[in-house]
Image (cartoon, rainbow, N blue to C red):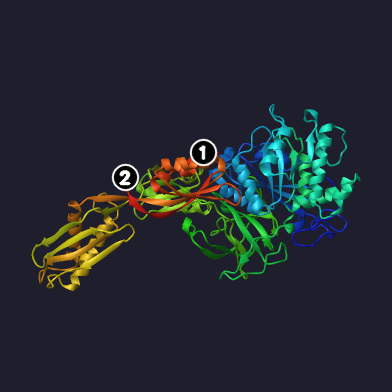
Amino acid sequence: MSTKGTRESAKGTGPGAPDPRRGENGAALAANHPAGIRNVALVGHSGAGKSLLVEALLAATGAITRMGSISDGTTVSDSDPSAIHQQRSVTMSVAPIMVGDIKINLIDTPGYTDFTGELRAGLRAADAALFVVSAVEAIDGATVALWGECQSIRMPRAVVLSKLDHPRADFSAAVVRCREAFGDSVLPLYLPAEGNAGLIGIIHGTSDEESVEEARGPLIEGIIAESEDETLMDRYLEGEELPLADLVRDLETAVARGSFFPVLPASAETGLGLAELMSLITDALPSPLERIPPAAMRLDGSSLKPLECDPTARLAAEVVRTTVDPFLGRVCLVRVFSGTLREDSSIHIGGRGLADRGHEDHDADERVTHLYSPVGSSLKAVPQCIAGDICAISKLANAETGDSISDREAPLLIETWNMPEPLMPIAIEGASRSDEDALAKSIGKVAAADPTLRLERNQDTHQLILWCMGEAHAEVVLDRLRNQGVKLQTVEVITPLRETFATKATGHGRHVKQSGGHGQFAICDIEVEPLARGEGFTFADKIVGGVIPGTFVGSVEKGVRSQMLKGVSAGFPVVDIKVTLVGGKTHSVDSSDAAFQAAGALALREAAAGARIQLLEPVSTVVVSVPDDYVGSVMSDLSGRRGRVTGTIAEDTGGTEISAEVPDQELLRYAIELRALTAGTGRFRRSYLRHEPLPK
């Protein structure tokens, strides 16, 4: 692509202003300035060829000597626990290449839905997204949903059609599928020549082939539609030959601002289209200067003026990925949004908003001792990292994924990105008591690297629950723990039930012991009756004649409450009952607070023995968002889970939102089963509603 011309930047320089990425004479600025940096996230379904394309680009630019010589990760050690999953592309990694004076940070993101957190971290670090789509397979629903997610944040995008060397590859049909899935603003810039011998530029019009002529008209019209020159369309319709430089300028502008999406054919195996792809990235995709940084605030929550992608401004950076290396310790992948991060500098690390996932809020000052440029699993030492660039920092004691890094003298917090909610529970326990201790130490390290993992020690069942995104995510988490020497096992998740009295009952508590000296004497009589769901516990005193002094009435209530926590039938807490103290006896010497607490507990147990005890199960409100094609099957599935559909709402972005009330026991694997039911397009959220009687 030609790179002559100008275009409007995200900083609002306006039409006709110099391209912020280039010098006065149009020459590309060096990579020591934000204008010479491109951060591009490769996204798409697993198996589309993202990692292979990254390696092909690295090999083509001399960054590596051969294909397959880099691995997934950001640490120098191949013993990274995630390395065993590299073939499944479960982690986000960064690899820089140099194209002329332009540094391109290629951010390879996972294709598995379980690792949406890593994918969103990659998008956070990027300024543009490159959708890698197979020219052989259909476009899956998850990729379409991801396109919509990028659309919502106005992220510039381009599409690479891969696997063109496959016998069943059909470029034209693949373009049609892309336009159907992504919209009419998706158009090819090149066509593969016969036998994939090279690419034919459509916009240049250098070929007389009928297919090129057919593709050129829609491409030019699409470019003109995005142009700020309102005369271009009239001139084109009148048959005027438009200057190529004007078309290229308008094309680059439209791509950079996220309103036009070019399609390029490419093959990592043969090298087809790699040069054209690198040209598109350097010439059309935006530099960090053309993207608005995320919002920032002071530590007290007060607002700050917008961040600027300026190496001389105050430091504002964010940890987008964390790993633990056995030699380097904690290694953080960092995107710098403002200022310059330097080796041997003092920084402030702040993290808030993930306490519910086991990531405690923290504010700490540390020193940057080592700064690196990441290349897959290897690290190259660098003295600094400027605004717009990506680097790695080792040996930070406190930093976790999602944390903000700023100057120690001017600390700030960057607004965090939207983290997906983990909704599949896995219960684990150490194989022995010593393993329980090792598990407690290791689980924090794993959680620090994974903000999509939520830790819960259930107060009712006392189980350690890992809330994961799905089976693959759970497997990765468990393997990371095992690779730290922890022997553990998974156990069945216990649904925290409740108990209640279904009928009225009376109970007699007699706690009388005599063993010389002061004894223990306490007798109480209670009546128990059920309350409506959610009313909790009520204690009433109807003692007549002062047979139990007021000082011991509270003791009886304490004993009843203590027994309620322990349960009276199946060992689950008792809820929604009213207990009335109606009688009892005391001893002038041997009665005590402890004795009446014991009597109160005994009275409740005796009352339970003569009553019908009802088990209650937790029920959650579930909101499922699915494309319209799956509404019927999802509603039927919810009914099969003993769910009650309470309503449906059409979503503004298309699709339907289904609300239902579903027992928690039926939701243990719903994250997996909904994905299978909706071809990866369904998503849901849940919140506790109430406890209801458990069916017999």
Q: Quadrant of the C terminus?
A: top left
> Viewer-proximal residue, 242 or 481?
242
The residue under label 2 is: 695
> Viewer-proximal residue, 682 or 83?
682
Q: Quadrant of the N terminus?
A: top right
- Amino acid type, residue under disc 1 in the picture: Ala
Q: Kindly state the secondary structure of the residue where label 2 is placed.
A: loop
The x, y position of residue 593, in whole percent, is 19, 68
In this rendering, the answer to whether 601 lies above or below 464 is: below
The residue under label 1 is: 676
Q: Earlier in the sequence, mark 1 or mark 2?
A: 1
The x, y position of residue 378, in whole percent, is 64, 46
In this rendering, the answer to whether 624 lies above or below 298 is: above
From this viewpoint, is residue 461 visible? no
Q: What residue is at 17 percent from the left and 58 percent from the top?
A: 506
Q: Kindly state the secondary structure of the residue where label 1 is placed.
A: helix
Cα distance between the residues tagged 1 and 2: 28 Å
Graded by Cα atoms within 10 Å as few (under 14), some (14 to 19) or many (20 or more), the crowding at tag 2 reads few
In this view, the residue farthest toward the right is 240
Q: Is residue 530 left or right of residue 65?
A: left
Graded by Cα atoms within 10 Å as few (under 14), some (14 to 19) or many (20 or more), the crowding at tag 1 reads few
The x, y position of residue 296, in whole percent, is 62, 65
From this viewpoint, is residue 248 visible? yes
- Amino acid type, residue under disc 2 in the picture: Pro
